[in-house]
Amino acid sequence: MKQSNKIRIKKAALRLFGEKGYEDTSLHEIALAVGIKKPSIYNHFDHKEDIFCAVLDDLLLSETTAYQHIQEQMKKDEPKTNLRMLFDLYCQRLMTTEEALLWKRVTFFPPPQFKKMIEEKFFEFENVVTEILSAIYKDAQAADILREVDGNEFAASFFCLVDGIFLEHHYYNEQVFRQRIDSVWKVYNLGIFKGKGE
């Protein structure tokens, strides 16, 4: 089925906003990428700000849906495996999705007029992941496999871990990045779980 122009506009804008940033992306460029004339955009969006907001809404939905889907695949009695699944999903999406490129750009260089909205989207997404982490923490506690960390520390340590990964991906090629992922997971695992890390 042929996609509607509105969807195609948002997809083109997602890519261009991620590559060039909001300020340096023009409506003309978006129209050109879609294969339509610039005035046709106004059949779907009033101005560029509307497109950006719609793209951010779609980004948040895509991210939260992916994490909720992985939660559905988790097994209650395997908290270590579940935490690694969550970590791997984060790394996989960081390396392979166009959403990740835009997420990185707006995190490091948020357009001033959208800064508050971007922060709200960020914390909304973080709340989704926090709920998943909370469930993993409770299962790990029940299995008595955690070192002495409380639920807040458990969640905070994971977010700091992936925040570091977020920055690493900005500087290293894929081969080096994958090596660093394995290394940091090994050390992190040893730090929060009793016994030998995996």
Image (cartoon, helix red, strand yellow):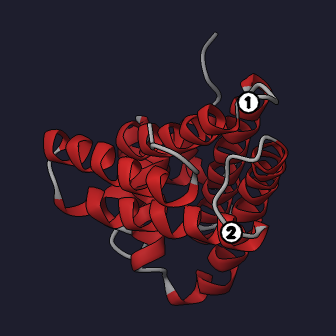
| Residue toward you, 21 or 28 | 21
- Label 1: element kind: helix
Three-letter code, disc 1: His
| Residue toward you, 135 or 6 | 135
Q: Which residue is mark 1?
A: 69
Q: In the image, which disc is placed on residue 149?
A: 2
Q: Is tag 1's residue or tag 2's residue first in the polypeptide sequence?
A: 1
Which dot, 1 or 2, sits closer to the camera? 2
The quarter of the image holding the C terminus is top left
Q: Is residue 129 left or right of residue 16?
A: right
The answer, for residue 122, to whether it is visible in the render is: no
Q: Residue at x 63, y 74 (%)?
A: 118
Q: Residue at x 28, y 49 (%)?
A: 183
Three-letter code, disc 2: Val
Estimate the x, y position of residue 100 in percent, counting from the top left. Answer: 45, 51
- Label 2: element kind: loop
Q: Residue at x 51, y 41 (%)?
A: 11
